[in-house]
Amino acid sequence: MSKKEAKKEKISRRHYIQLIAAVLYNCNIKGFAEGSIYKGNTKGICVPGLNCYSCPGAVASCPLGSLQSALVSSKYKFPYYILGTLILMGLLLGRFICGFLCPFGFLQDLLHKIPTPKLRKNKVTRALSWLKYVILLLFVILVPIFHMVPGFCKYICPAGTLEAGIPLVLENEPLREMIGFLFSWKVYLLVLILVLCVFCYRSFCRFLCPLGALYSLFNPVSFFGIKVDPEKCTHCNACVKACQMDVKKVCDRECIQCGKCRHVCPEGAIHYGIRARKSPEKKTEG
């Protein structure tokens, strides 16, 4: 197998994993046929990636939706479970989840493969990457706490519109009669985001996704992920130049650990693995 063929094979493996994750998250085929929402016991469990609770095929909950719901009711009960779940997933995998286990991320990857002129990362895109933290603070935390509304799910989430809103409206005539400005706004926003993803790599992940913002806080210290061998690295910066995210170094807050940097590193210094923490060397007396 040539190097070119091997590279293509390695890149495609990630997409297979993404596809499998999307299918596992939404394997309730009966729900799609009936236009109903599954409410079994597994809905008490959160999947790692962004996947709407109300999707007819969803067999588990969205961590972001669960966090907002918990914060809405936080006046009565502190959300220990969902916060613990998010912290655990963040510490274990960081934004590896964004690169491998998020269905909406998978859709963005596919859209970007459409042959069109592409917008490359620049100072503007790097500045816009901070917007998702503003959305996390305002719509995921403050709006649910002070206005008792899951702000991101209600006003922004394109995954919810695509996976739940549109299928449920198509399947249920009573819901079609209730369509108003809010639903129209979310459909327009979804279309805008999907079109933007064709020209700008993972624009939702980079600029708008509060779940990615949350996981990014754990990215540099996650237990498993992509790492650089300091003994092999020559600091040529080939990894950063090849990356389509707004990274400044491998596995910083913007890295989704997709592994593209592994294939361009001339020294083979980048690989996946357990990030072992080095304990400080003890000084011996004498």
Image (spheres, rainbow, N blue to C red):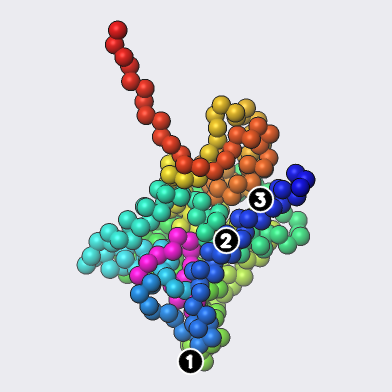
* Secondary structure at numbered mark 2: helix
At 55% across and 79% down in the image, what residue appears?
166
Distance between mark 3 and mark 2 Cα atoms: 13 Å
Q: The residue under label 2 is which amino acid type?
A: Gln
Where residue 18 is drawn, which disc sits there?
Answer: 2
Distance between mark 2 and mark 1 Cα atoms: 34 Å
From this view, report whether residue 285 is shown above or below residue 19: above
Sequence-first disc among 3 and 2: 3
Distance between mark 1 and mark 3 Cα atoms: 47 Å
Q: The residue under label 1 is which amino acid type?
A: Pro
Q: Indicate the position of residue 277 as horizontal and vertical percent values.
A: 41, 34
Q: Is residue 147 visible?
A: no
Which span is picked out in magenta? 44-57
From this view, report whether residue 66 is shown above or below residue 221: below
Mark 2 or 1: the one toward you: 2
User: Magenta stretch mostly in which secondary structure?
Assistant: loop
Which residue corresponds to mark 1? Answer: 174
* Secondary structure at numbered mark 1: helix
At 51% across and 68% down in the image, what residue appears?
24
Q: Is residue 63 visible?
A: yes
- What is the crowding at mark 3: few (fewer than 14 residues within 10 Å), some, or many (at least 20)? some
* Secondary structure at numbered mark 3: helix
At 68% across and 59% down in the image, what residue appears?
112
Residue lying farthest front? 1
Where residue 10 is drawn, which disc sits there?
Answer: 3
At 50% across and 45% down in the image, what residue appears?
225
